[in-house]
Every structure is written in C-alpha cells, then in structure tokens.
Image: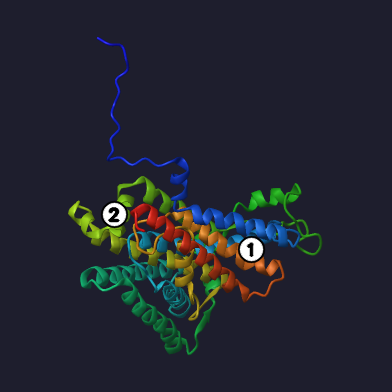
Amino acid sequence: MSDAPTQFAEDERIKTRSKFREAMIRPELGGIIGTITVFAMFLIFAGDSGMFNSQGVMNWSQISAQFMIIAVGACLLMIAGEFDLSVGSMIGFAGMLIAIFSVTLGWPVWLAILVTFAIATAIGALNGFIVVRTGLPSFIVTLAFLFILRGFAIYLPQTIERKTIIGGVADAAEGDWLASLFGGKILTGLFQWLGDNGWIAVFERGTRKGQPVVEGLPMLIVWAVLLVVIGHVILTKTRFGNWIFAAGGDAEAARNSGVPVNRVKILMFMFTAFCATVFATCQVMEFGGAGSDRGLLKEFEAIIAVVIGGALLTGGYGSVLGAALGALIFGVVQQGLFFAGVESSLFRVFLGLILLFAVILNTYIRRVITGER
C-alpha cells in the first residue's frame, strides 16, 4: 500500500471566503466602526471638557444604558422579522401604571411593578398574536398600539388625578425590596475606595466632603448589561436563538423545518414589551414619578440603534452586541455634543448621518450574503 497521504477533491458546492471577507460581513462591523469613530472624534474635540472623567463617563453611560435596554428587545424582534413601534408609548403607559397603582391606589410598590410587567407583557403578546393571526404587517399593528397606549397614558391620570404627571413614587418606594432593584445603586463601597485612593473625584468641601462624586453603579446600567448578556447568549448559544434567525430569514421554510415561527414571534413581542417596562420602571424610580409624555420617539431611537448595530431591516440577520454598540453611540454623541459645546439640535443631524452610513453598509452586507447585485 502507498504511504502517500490521501488526497480529497475539493467540493465545488462549498464556497470558501477569506478571513477578511468573513470579518466584513459581521453584523457588529458598523457598530464597531461607528464606536471607534465617535470616541476618537470626542477625544479630540472634547477630551479636556470633563467628558471622560468619572462623572462625565457616568453621564453618557446612563444615557447609553437607556437606549441599550430597549435596543435589546428591538434587536431580537427585528431579527425575527418584525417591528414594534409601540415601545415608546409602552414606556409612558407602564410608568403611569406603576404610579397609579402605588400612589393613587396605595398598593405596595413591588406589587405595582409586578402587575405592570404582567399587563405590559400581555399587551406584547396581544401585539404578536394579532400579527401572526391576521398576517398584517407588524408596522401597522404596533402603530395602532402606539396611539392606543399613548392615549391611555394621558387619559388615565387625567381622569383619576386631573393631571398628566403623578409624583410621590419615591416616597412610596422607600424601603421596597423590588423598587431597589430598579432605582438603587450597587458597588458603593468600591466607588468610595476609588475616591479615597484618588482614582475618581471626590467632593472637596461641604457636608459631602470626601464622598465620591460618583457614588455607585446605577441599576439602570446593571439592567442594560444584564439584558445585553442574556440577549446575546439566547441569540448565539441556544436553539431558540437559531429559531429567531430562521423566523426572520424565511418564515415559511422555517415552518417546514419544524420551527414554531408564530410562538417565536409572539415571545419576541413580549420580550420587547418587557424591556420597555424595565426602562419605564428605572425611569420612574429615578425621577420619583411618571409623566404621560415619557418615552416619546424611543421606538425610533431603538430601531436606529439596532440598524446602526448591523441588523437588517428585512430580518434574519443582526447582533445584540451590535445593537448595544449602536446604543453606546447614541449616548456618547448626545452627551459629547454638549461637552464639545456644539448646539444640541445637531444631535439629530449627526444621528441621521450615522444612520445613513449604517444603512448603506448593511445594504452591502445583504448583497454579499444573498448574492444580489
């Protein structure tokens, strides 16, 4: 027998790609490029403005965390091939429910939060059920709920309290175990140690002398990181994540392969509503009250963050990490323009340019994936 190594013929059905090409079609590419560009720009133009000291970092981190929370839900839903335009209204509606239940009706805050989450996720399920049962575009169905939920967010407090802002939640939440998971801070001892050792700024005079300017890590940021990690793991490490991609890529083929497409889509609508309610709860605990105008335009900001992060509008492709980077770009730009002394209204202009670049890049990626010309 010959000792020569066996030669296998190359299977011409398998198309090989270079490592560079593989990197170019990663969903996070646009978000990575955008993040590097944004940080480089503000390091140059606002590096000495306080934007990158402890307080400045905390400012834009909290803004980014807000976008990040709703972007995770929007990302998974968009990969599944659907949109939810009621996210912003859900934020206002859920926050108002918490305030009414806890302040007006006198419920324990923990009960108000749990009931609100149950109602919100039920509405998300209703959104998904209508979409999958009627075959109507999710754009139309959730646009209707955008107006319905916003209408209730205005009607309920006006009818019950004769006003559109309800305060007093902070007092009602004092000592509440569940409220502290949305409005408190963690690692306060670590931040005090960092201040004592000169790593972060401390107050130099007054009653707070020696206390760190940044006292701890807000639960808003903790929730953002937690949801990003959970979303990423579900999408990339589980069978259900494969189902999400399949449902958004080709729903009919996925059904023929045994994927429960309708259930996947309904669960994604529920998860999007859950993320919106997390945002609303954190916001209510931060401000100590609820307003009927909370969450305006957040649905579009969430979608833009997801698109900047590399998701395709056609579904079946995207990344939770990319969406998180898109949300980070939001926060850094919004606060960076302030630190750089630029007119704040230009935030929308800058955002539009980033979105345009992301859409062009995503179009190229889609053509590479599908072979379109």
Q: The N terminus lies in which quarter of the figure?
A: top left
Q: Position of residue 334 (x, y in %)?
A: 61, 68
Q: Quadrant of residue 347?
A: bottom right
Give the structural element (helix, strand or loop) at label 2.
Answer: helix
Residue 21, given in percent of the width and then of the height, sits at: 45, 46
**Is residue 215 at least partly visible in the picture?**
no
Which residue appears at 51% of the width and 66% of the height? 355
Find residue 112 and report its image quarter.
bottom left
How far is mark 2 from mark 1, CA to CA?
A: 38 Å
Q: Residue furthest front?
A: 373
Callout 2: 10 Å neighbours few (<14), some, many (20+)? Answer: many
152 and 313: which one is in front?
313
Q: Is residue 94 left or right of residue 132?
A: right
Instruction: Look at discs 2 and 1 and give the one toward the viewer.
Output: 2
Residue most extreme to the top: 1
The C terminus, quarter of image:
bottom left
Q: Which residue is mark 1?
A: 59
Q: Is residue 5 visible?
A: yes
Question: Which of 364/155 is in front?
Answer: 364
The first of marks 2 and 1 along the sequence is 1
Q: Which residue is mark 2?
A: 246
Residue 117 to residue 185: above or below:
below
